[in-house]
Image (tube, grey):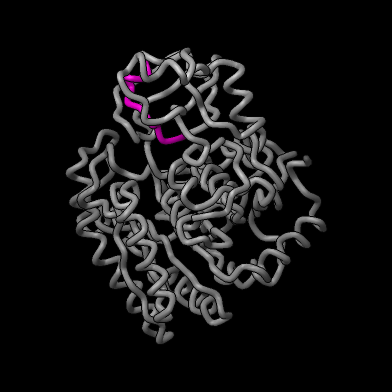
Amino acid sequence: MTLQLSLEEGLFQRQTLYDQARRVVVKVGSAVLTDDVGINKNIIAQLASQLTFLQGTGREVILVTSGAVAAGRRRLNKPKSAHEPLKIKQALAATGQGLLMQAYEQAFARHEQPVAQILLTHTDLSNRRRYLNARNTILTLFEFGVIPIINENDSVSAEELRFSDNDTLAALMTNMIGADMLIILTDVDCLYTGNPLEDASAKPVYTVARIDRTIEAMAGHSTSSLGTGGMGAKIRAAKMVAACGGSSFIGPGKREDVLQALFSGEPVGTFFLPDVSRAINQRKHWIAYVLRPEGELVVDAGAAQALVDKGKSLLPSGVLAVHGQFGMGAPVHCLDSDGSLIAAGLSNYAAVDISRILGKNTSEIAAILGHKDHDEIIHRDNLVLFGGSSSNDT
């Protein structure tokens, strides 16, 4: 498959997806929202106008915003240091979050558009019940005609429980609510084939059909001044959304009419097409991308082929080694014998039990453990290949 589409073909694909998109997530980064004096209220005003416009076209809209830490830093005049303690970042976030939400509330009020604030930590999404509660809250806000404004709860998030960046949070939100499109507004125009400041032959990439290592390598050519994620995080977010059948856009957040230009079909930014042939369902997205693995299972060539090519469950006979200490039901990653990641899943057995039955036939499990709750180490219903599955249940 061609990774990049021609300009003409790409614009045709874009316009079709714009017209079909009924639910949209817009993420805006710190580099766009803040300047030398704090929150850039002109940008906030432009954003409120554009999102209200988008909502007015009959679409449901979510805003995922960065900017709380940067706003707090500017408000308290605290320069950024290389090894800043977590408590400093938390205090800055606590200071800046109110300033950020106040700016949004005032800007949207000019358009009589109600908004609601939702602050999340990774724990809120890794717990299945809380994950579904967050989803239901957002869907109810849609019914009320409200635009949810979502940010990570940086003031209480511990490092090990944080989202890696708000690009990841935006992708998780997109897939959680079944949105059709993720729009990432940043301080770079688009993805380039090379660094345009150093390579005169570097060209903008307008439409990407499929994200692979070639596309991922291009992310190193673009940098952002304030954000934590960079272009690499944005490409990973687009890849997560594509895996669930959604499309993504990365483009210039400081352009006043960027959303109108986008939905009118102008060749702005970089667009990523969905992988509709291999889209995974919402529950499998939760397993693959929200849960953090507590261990790893190394599988042999036969098991790897059965998983990847045939969509089979993982049996004890195909497991070569187990890494980590985890309990029954824990999220784990599956690696092939070369160490390449091939799947994620929920383990039916604890690590200590897997170490005793690996390489054995299912008929031997009861004799070895004294019980047999399952034939499979991971059932195919709880297993997600990194490359997708065609099921659509939730």
Q: Nearer the viewer, residue 281 or 229?
A: 281
Tell me where residue 376 appears, x and y as whole percent.
46, 28
Tell me where residue 358 appears, x and y as whole percent.
43, 15
Q: Nearer the viewer, residue 60 or 136?
A: 136
Q: Residue at x 35, y 14 (%)?
A: 368
Image-based side of 49 in relation to 261, left or right: left
Q: Nearer the viewer, residue 290 or 51?
A: 290
Q: Residue at x 58, y 69 (%)?
A: 259
Question: Would you place residue 63 above or below residue 250 in this image?
Answer: below
140 falls in the magenta region: no
Q: Is residue 146 visible?
A: yes
Q: Residue at x 52, y 63 (%)?
A: 254
Tell me where residue 171 appears, x and y as whole percent.
48, 52
Q: Is residue 204 visible?
A: no
Question: Would you place residue 206 above or below residue 335 in this image?
Answer: below
Q: Nearer the viewer, residue 148 or 220?
A: 148
Q: Residue at x 44, y 22 (%)?
A: 297
Question: Would you place residue 182 above or below residue 111 in this image?
Answer: above
Image-based side of 322 in relation to 13, left or right: left
Image-based side of 39 in relation to 308, left or right: left
Numbered-mark total: 0
Tell me where residue 299 appears, x and y as whole percent.
52, 19
Q: Which residues are magenta?
A: 345-355
The quadrant in which the N terminus is found is: top right
Which quadrant would residue 330 be assigned to in this image?
top left
